[in-house]
Amino acid sequence: MGSLIGHVLPGIAFLALGLWHLFNHIKLYSLHPNSYISSAWFPTSKVRHLELFLIMAGSSISISMELFIGPERHQPFDSDGTIPSNHLKNFEHSSISMLFFVYATFAILLDRFKPKSHLGLTQLLGAVAFGQQLFLFHLHSTDHQGLEGQYHLLLQAIVVVSVVTTLMGIGLPRSFLVSFVRSVSIFFQGVWFIVMGYMLWTPELLPRGCELYNEDEHHVVRCGSQQALHRAKSLVNILFSCFLIGTAIFAVSFYMGMVERFGTREDYYCKLPKEFEEMQEEEEEFCDAESQKEKKFGESKGAFVHMEARIAPFNMER
């Protein structure tokens, strides 16, 4: 991952996934505002688990690149079977991809067997995957104290939002805003990955006073003085703010356009894909059962109060 292509490719994957989720959440909420239920993934009409298959494929490619294709000897271990220091980052990056692979695999299994709380468990696995991503970026073996560290620090802030909103989605499955923010955070992760790739590994785009060096087969950015480093970090903060503003404008504009297209036309209401309907029906059946329980409890409580009202006069007459 420590290269331009190693940041741009994952960035495109996160960007596409976030945009796919944003599109489907807004569409689902526009068509069913009263019965909207959040989902960790979305099926397609021809291949139900296409999204999850693509996550598994992307994770597999990432693991192969980090452990077998990228290293010169096409294997990450040293001659004595230990992990060399310059390959620690490869194992860290592949661990992130491995957990996303595990998430997608169990999401398919949970969807097929449909045990109790399978939707919540899928959300939990997603939160664990984002949590490990945050953990490894925060405690990365690579030196992230300089300019590269500033980029990764801001990336961690985005991942925190993804973790928190994914966990909130377990307890608040009907909250559209939670799903909306989670989708935007995944999208923004992709945007920032791409920005990092180009800004850190394109010498012409480096701030004044900073240069790209090759240290232990890893390209790092070093600034000539503290003043140059401070200026470079400030420029990164400004760049992050600009992309944050742009992402916010895009997300809200995209929402308004989607609502205008799907929310104001009744003929789209019946065109919800069959896979979405199945997922909605499962949750609606659960909610209906809960409401019936509450209704029965309310009726029995009302009957009890009514009996008290009839018995009370009899006691008073005695």
Image (tube, rainbow, N blue to C red):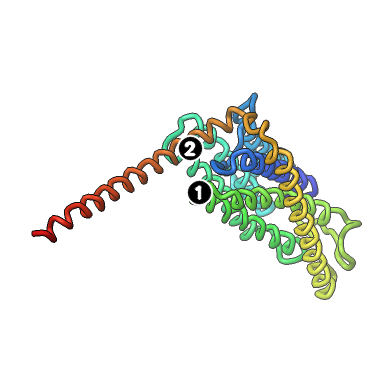
Question: Does residue 245 sit above or below 31 in this rendering?
Answer: below
Q: Secondary structure at mark 1?
A: helix
**Location of the C terminus (image quadrant):** bottom left
Q: Position of residue 210 (x, y in %)?
A: 86, 65
Q: Quadrant of residue 246?
A: bottom right
Asked whether 298 or 61 is in front, the reply is 298
Q: Residue at x 62, y 43 (%)?
A: 29
Q: Position of residue 297 (x, y in %)?
A: 31, 46
Q: Residue at x 54, y 33 (%)?
A: 108
Residue type at mark 2 is: Glu
Q: Position of residue 166 (x, y in %)?
A: 56, 50
Residue 53 shown left or right of residue 11 in the figure: left
Q: Which residue reaches farthest front? A: 317
Question: Does residue 317 sit above or below 286 in this rendering?
Answer: below
Asked whether 78 or 311 is in front, the reply is 311
Residue type at mark 1 is: Ile
Neighbor class of circle 1 (other Cα within 10 Å; few <14, some 14-19, many 20+) is many
- The answer to whether any part of residue 67 appears in the image is no
- The answer to whether any part of residue 253 appears in the image is yes
Q: Secondary structure at mark 2?
A: helix
For discs 1 and 2, the disc positioned in front in the rendered view: 2
Q: Residue at x 88, y 56 (%)?
A: 203
Asked whether 305 or 116 is in front, the reply is 305
Q: Which residue reaches farthest left? A: 318
Q: Residue at x 80, y 72 (%)?
A: 230
Q: Position of residue 208 (x, y in %)?
A: 89, 66
Q: Say which residue label 1 marks.
A: 170
Q: Say which residue label 2 marks.
A: 284
